[in-house]
Amino acid sequence: KLNAELKNKVFSFMTSDSNVMHVGTVDITPGYNVQAICYDSKHSCFYAGVTSSDNNTQIIYTLDDELNKINTTIISEPALHLNTMTYNSRTDKLYTIRSSGHELLEINLTNSNVNVVHTFADFNSGVQYDPVRDVYVGINGPSITHSTEWQYFIYDNQFNKIKTGSFVNPYGYNTNETPNGFCCYDGKMVHSAFNTSQKYGSANKVQFIFEVDYDGNVGKVYQEYFKNMEYEGIAYSDGKFFTVSNVLDDKLLITLIDPSGLFSKSLRLMMQRV
């Protein structure tokens, strides 16, 4: 169970404390920050990526469906921020985008090798794979486009660009909106992003999760958090979303959001550094 002090800190990030449940801890290496999470549907596991402060060393933890750590892969790849990770069940490969925004990299968890599989002409701050539509999606937020619009690219399974689109966040905050994690499933993008809100005052960073289809139509807004909450990554599995955050001092947080239950079944897993 959470002690009273930790419980108060956790609840300060929530719109309601009724959807918080402590289920366990996972140790990670000290001095690293979580950047991404994705789900491997073929092997029924999660990949959580953390990066050193200089972005030159990365660690990917393989977690089972109960979020137990079952493998650790250490990578030494300069300028690899792991802003997003995505798994393709058809190729059985794990991918990420280099910090330069153009090189799509395959991560080999067996030998820790990182190989360039494609170089995009477009800049992409993150890339995700849609297993239902068999396409890849790249994204840039207003902090990249220098406007109020988000920009996205859709590529076929051979990385040929088949569509370019844009949309505006329904909250319409400002050009500081930064794309963190996002995931794709069946023609939809689900984004986690944050900004310094004009709506709520410059002292508050606002974290929100919202859905956009491949025509740029904004759909559901799943959740909105305050108190400088920042989701670093988001994964989709079996109708639910898993987000990962750097919060609570030296603790990393995974949040399960169940839209069908209106968050009544949500839980949080504390990932505590050793």
Image (spheres, rainbow, N blue to C red):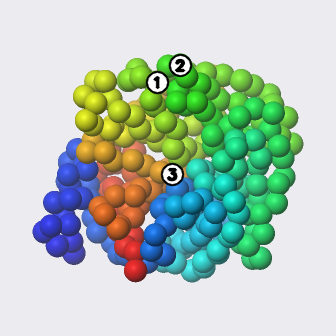
Determine contact: label 1, label 2, CB under 8 Å: yes
State whether residue 216 appears in this view.
no
Question: Can you identify the residue that label 2 sits on?
Answer: 147
Instruction: Give the side of residue 65 with respect to residue 170, left or right.
Output: right
Q: Quadrant of the N terminus?
A: bottom left
Q: CA–CA distance between discs 1 and 2?
A: 6 Å
Q: Amino acid at mark 1?
A: Thr
Residue 233: numbered disc: 3
Q: Nearer the viewer, mark 3 or mark 1?
A: 1
Residue that badge 1 annotates: 175
Do we see residue 144 in this rendering? yes
Q: Check whether the beta carbons of the residues at disc 3 and disc 2 lie within 8 A of each other.
A: no
Q: Secondary structure at mark 1?
A: loop
Secondary structure under tag 2 reads loop
Earlier-in-chain disc, 3 versus 2: 2
The amino acid type, in three-letter code, at marker 2 is Ser
Q: Amino acid at mark 3?
A: Gly
* Left or right: 86 in relation to 255: right
> In this rendering, is residue 18 above or below 150?
below
Numbered label attached to residue 152: none
Q: CA distance from mark 3 to mark 2?
A: 23 Å
Rendered-image quadrant of the C terminus: bottom left
Q: Residue at x 58, y 30 (%)?
A: 144
Residue at the image position 68 percent from the left and 70 percent from the top? 75
